[in-house]
Image (cartoon, rainbow, N blue to C red):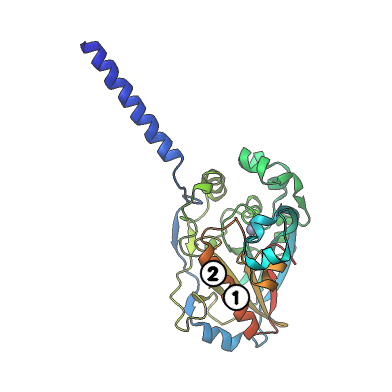
Amino acid sequence: MFRQSRFLAAAAFIIIALSGAALIAFSDKSQTTHQTVTSSLGKPISSSAMEALIDRPGPTAIRTVVGADWKADLSGLLNLKDPKSVEAGFVDHEEPIQIYTHLVRHPTQGFFMIDTGVSKRFAEHPESVGVPWVLRNFAKMDKLQVREDALSAIKSEGVPLKGVFMTHLHFDHVSGMPDVPNDVPFYTGPGEAREEKFGNLVVQGMEDRFFDGRPAIQEFQFTKDPDGKLEGVIDVFGDGSFFAILTPGHTAGHLSFVARTPAGPVLLTGDACHTRWGWEHDVEPGSFTFDRGAERKSLLQLRALSERHPKMIVRLGHQP
Ligand SMILES: [Zn+2]
């Protein structure tokens, strides 16, 4: 009797431990557990202060590099349930897309990147840099054709890379990280690293490995835009030449950027909008989404910004 009750207690303990482990394994996960700190760069300004400046030619140069051609399901890239998508009669298919990095040159601050493009090692030997089996087999990585890899793009500038501004931390945006030197700081929007969702289970280990040995991720600290036209704006270098705009929704801390170049303002939407059709028809991305309502609001805010500044060149997340 005594032995039997000890056996039952042990069995109960094992069942509780296993279900606890299963709960931990299958609960929401952050994108990365890497340390984060408040950014030492950038100060909040109002959208009206930014907009008073951006149509004046500025000192920042932007070169958009096509890191790779790729394909993704249209249902991920575009909300096919939006009435405009329904009216257009879209059916889900593999849509041609591209992965970009944008090289930012500032006359005194130096050379920065927005997103990381694609490393050859990531594309050609993904297992060697820790890309998990699930991504290698289900993310259409066999359709990834490298055009200008991240290492070539970084070397092309001929000066040290001072930092990387991330629109967000999805795997097709950190895919150039194996080519970024370990001491280069990374900047994100607030709460981006700790965005909790079940799907992050697949990528957290890879992202942690990409950030291993690097400085803490610097998170821009926005204040609410007093004009209410955007969520928040940061003057990144403090001289009115380059701005980060908080555009949450695609991910928790998604960012878009505006650069004042000699040819006028350039808006880099990041994945607030993936596709050209989505931009032209006000339809937000599809299933690759953290918070649809916020995502739609961010897209419409950027659309209104571009309408207020018709000369602004717009570069979208994954299509020219
Ligand atoms: Zn993307």
Quarter of the figure with residue 239: bottom right
Q: Is residue 3 above or below residue 207?
A: above
Q: Is residue 231 visible?
A: yes
Residue 313 at what x, y percent from top left? 71, 77
Residue 28 at what x, y percent from top left? 45, 47
Q: In the rendered structure, find residue 247 and report the number of the disc placed on it.
A: 2
Q: Toward the viewer: 276 or 48?
A: 276
Q: Residue at x 65, y 87 (%)?
A: 55
Residue 173 at what x, y percent from top left? 63, 57
Judge: label 2 CB < 8 Å from ligand 1.
no
Q: Residue at x 65, y 39 (%)?
A: 127
Left/right placement of residue 211 relative to residue 15 reads right
How much space separates mark 1 and mark 2, taking CA atoms? 8 Å
Q: Is residue 102 visible?
A: no
Say whether marks 1 and 2 touch (CB < 8 Å).
yes
Quarter of the figure with residue 3: top left
Residue 77 at what x, y percent from top left? 66, 59
Q: Toward the viewer: 51 or 259?
A: 51
Left/right placement of residue 222 relative to residue 209 reads left
Q: Can you say which quadrant of the picture contains the C terminus? A: bottom right
Secondary element type, mark 1: helix
Q: Residues within 10 Å of mark 2 (few under 14, many from 20)?
A: many
- Residue position marked by numbered label 1 in the rendering: 302
Q: Residue at x 57, y 60 (%)?
A: 168
